[in-house]
Amino acid sequence: MEERILVVDDEVSIASAIAYGLNKEGYRTETAYDGQQALEKIKFFQPKILILDIMMPKLGGFDVLKSIGNRKGMGVVMLTAKNEIFDKILGLELGADDYMTKPFDMRELMARVRSLIRRLEAAADTESDEINIGLLQIILNQRKVILQGEVLDFTPKEFDLLVLLLSNPERVYTRDELLNLIWGMDYFGGTRTVDIHIQRIRKKLGAPHQDILQTVHGVGYKAAGGFDENQH
């Protein structure tokens, strides 16, 4: 089945050019020209990939990203005319998967879209089971984190980071490794991003489950291999 891609940009010429290029690659596309229209189209079109401009009328790209909530396997590539590192960090912190600054080469955008689709498909293939640690349950194919019967609100990157660590207990990951595995080789926000996400995950898990994620001082992080909440 052809993958669906929604292109959102208030510059009609840019949105049309991207959609044209995607159509030539065999994708099924829709376009939207402001954030509000994008949210409406996401509901019925259910795109695999969202190509999203940041600066738009009515509702900007960051606000769209915040409003989507659980993306259920939808990848996001953000576009901007700016080359501000703050914008890039904020977009990725909100769960975007990739980022391109205008003007860009259409061939590079197509390559990034293909790469993102492959990553999403690979993740879907492996997400067919559950991780259970005490009262903590992670349903991989639904991307849900449940603690004592309550569904916790995790961002896509928080979820991916938690699952990576819990899937490989006692495996020590450096901050650089986690940054590359979760955010990608091109991400340049710095390893502090990893620390912030670990802190947020621990806060959401609360005691005693926050102790599942352990700091390996001077190196990075690991998941405890023999966690027992009754011992905490």
Image: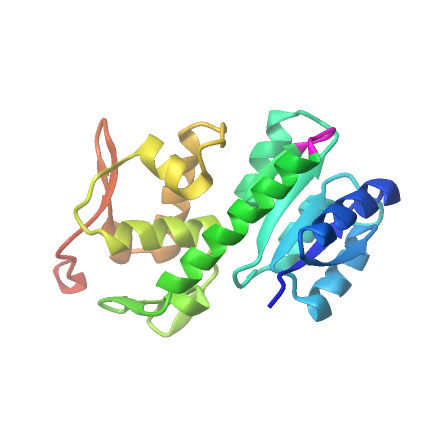
Residue 95 visible (yes or no): no
Q: Quadrant of the C terminus?
A: bottom left
Q: Which residues are magenta?
A: 101-105
Front-most of residues 136 and 68: 68
Position in image of residue 149 (x %, y %):
37, 74
Instruction: Report if residue 210 lies within the magenta region.
Output: no
Position in image of residue 116 (x %, y %):
53, 48
Task: Please tell me in which quadrant of the rendered image residue 230 appears.
Answer: bottom left
Residue lying at the far bottom in this picture: please name it: 149
The residue sitting at 72% across, 27% down in the picture is: 82
Instruction: Report if residue 104 lies within the magenta region.
Output: yes
The residue sitting at 23% across, 30% down in the picture is: 219
Position in image of residue 120 (x %, y %):
48, 55
Tally the numbered discs: 0
Q: Is residue 100 above or below residue 120?
A: above
The residue sitting at 39% across, 63% down in the picture is: 125
Coloration mode? rainbow
Q: Is residue 96 above or below residue 67?
A: above
In the image: residue 33, left or right of residue 224: right
Position in image of residue 112 (x %, y %):
57, 41
In the image: residue 208, left or right of residue 103: left
By secondary structure, the bulk of the magenta-drawn segment is best described as loop
